[in-house]
Amino acid sequence: MRGMWNWDENPNTQGQRTAGDDRGPDAGAPHGTVAPARTGPDAPIGADGSSGRAPQEESATSAAPSRRAPTWGGVVGLVLAGAVLSSGATLGGVVAYDALISPALTGPSAAAPSTAAASEQATTSVPVASTSGGPDWEGVASAVSPSTVAIQVSTASGTAEGTGVIYSEDGTIITNNHVVSGAGQILVSLTDGRILTASVVGADPSTDIAVIRLDAPPEGLQPAQLGDSDAVAVGQAVMAVGTPLGLENTVTTGIISAVDRPVTTTSETEGDPRQPEADAAYTSALQTDAAINPGNSGGPLVDAQGQVIGINSSIAGLATDESGTAGSIGLGFAIPSNTVRLIADQLIESGTARHAFLGVSARDGSATDGDVTSTGAEIVEVERGSAAQEAGLREGDLITEADDVPITGAAALTGVVRGLEVGSTHTVRFLRDGEEQEVQVTLTAAD
């Protein structure tokens, strides 16, 4: 069986797999079987494209994407494995949807500024102390569960379930875009059993982050405390909290298996499965072996102190048959908390999010420096007036590092840029004519 990747949120559309049978590409819930896309200069353009357009501005049903190399702002064609986006609102039925994902290492996660909303939530939750014998998971679960909610969404094709994290006392909740996209009605279940309605504040399909707010928030809501995902280390203990397969308040534990893992998910067009859609989500993700299953999407990944270091968004799985996939196999992925804060605060403020833009088209490449061969993102084209041109990058350069983190391919660059702040400056290392060089790049905003 080939490797598969899953969204872990649940629509109740048992047994259906045809393209367009669920929420469709415009809703941001990918579906359908996708073959690995072409690479190289003629590969379809990515989610942003060198034009700088945001992915939600692209046509999700375009039959003929532009024949240009994918950009740092969005790489669809450079993927290493097939993916599955899975859903299923009841314990008895999980529906699978294929998409694309790239599992190569990538660069740093975001350094996001705090806002009033972030400050409010950060002061209302007390971290849990670990015991001398290891993490106090009982204490962590007790502290974090009241800040975790179950989400049920009514769509045109049925119902869906996911998870959310209370962000502030005014009823603002963070979840995944693919949990609430296409929602007609959103019901939120608190840990005390109360069920309340909510509305979407803003959503960003390109990072798979959404913010919703309770229509009539009760008093006494307990916001979660977001930690610093830049400080997360491989091997540290973590807990996932969520609603897998409709089972509310489920906790699982594990470790951080990897950081800065580029995860690229997209859905196919209804026509040619070889043409992936421009509307894709890119993440420089935290990887964990804590059990994550359909329904965990949008829920918190927390450390031993009870701080949310990531929002669970997808899992890797194995195809079982045409109607579903296997559950957790110990390969789960979460959007780093710094990226979540960066995007969520913008969604709260304006309903939309701006994305950083380098301004290059790139493909997977390699170059030799002495006796050492390095892989990276080879620049195919530099957009005039872009941050890349201002920094002196040019066609043929092979980008190998961003802020001291290895860049092993074009898709890895995309995972990095989606978590970086517009106007931030970063050190980019590259090989040119066999010699290593570095430049300082100040990222601009995608148009």
Image (spheres, rainbow, N blue to C red):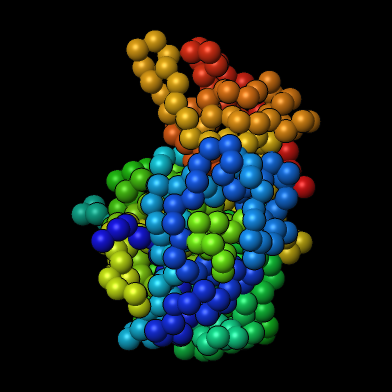
- Is residue 422 or residue 437 the one in the foreground? 437
Q: Answer with left or right where residue 301 lies relative to residue 394.
A: left
Query: Looking at the picture, how far across and down is residue 4, in whole percent?
Result: 35, 60
Residue visible at 24% across and 54% down in the picture: 134
Q: Answer with left or right where residue 229 lies relative to residue 248.
A: right
Query: Looking at the picture, how far across and down is residue 133, in whole percent?
Result: 21, 54
Residue visible at 52% across and 80% down in the picture: 21
- Is residue 143 or residue 338 the one in the foreground? 338
Residue visible at 62% across and 77% down in the picture: 182
- Is residue 291 or residue 136 the one in the foreground? 291
Q: Is residue 352 visible?
A: yes
Picture layout, residue 77 above or below residue 146: above
Query: Looking at the picture, how far across and down is residue 163, in whole percent?
Result: 48, 73
Q: Quadrant of the N terminus?
A: bottom left
Q: How many marks?
A: 0
Query: Looking at the picture, how far across and down is residue 264, in whole percent?
Result: 49, 52
Quarter residue 352 falls in: bottom right
Picture layout, residue 219 above or below residue 285: below
Picture layout, residue 307 above or below residue 444: below
Residue visible at 48% across and 13% down in the picture: 434
Quarter residue 444 falls in: top right
- Is residue 270 or residue 242 the one in the foreground? 270
Q: Answer with left or right where residue 201 lies relative to residue 161.
A: right
Picture layout, residue 24 above or below residue 52: below
Quarter residue 414 falls in: top right
Q: Is residue 417 visible?
A: no
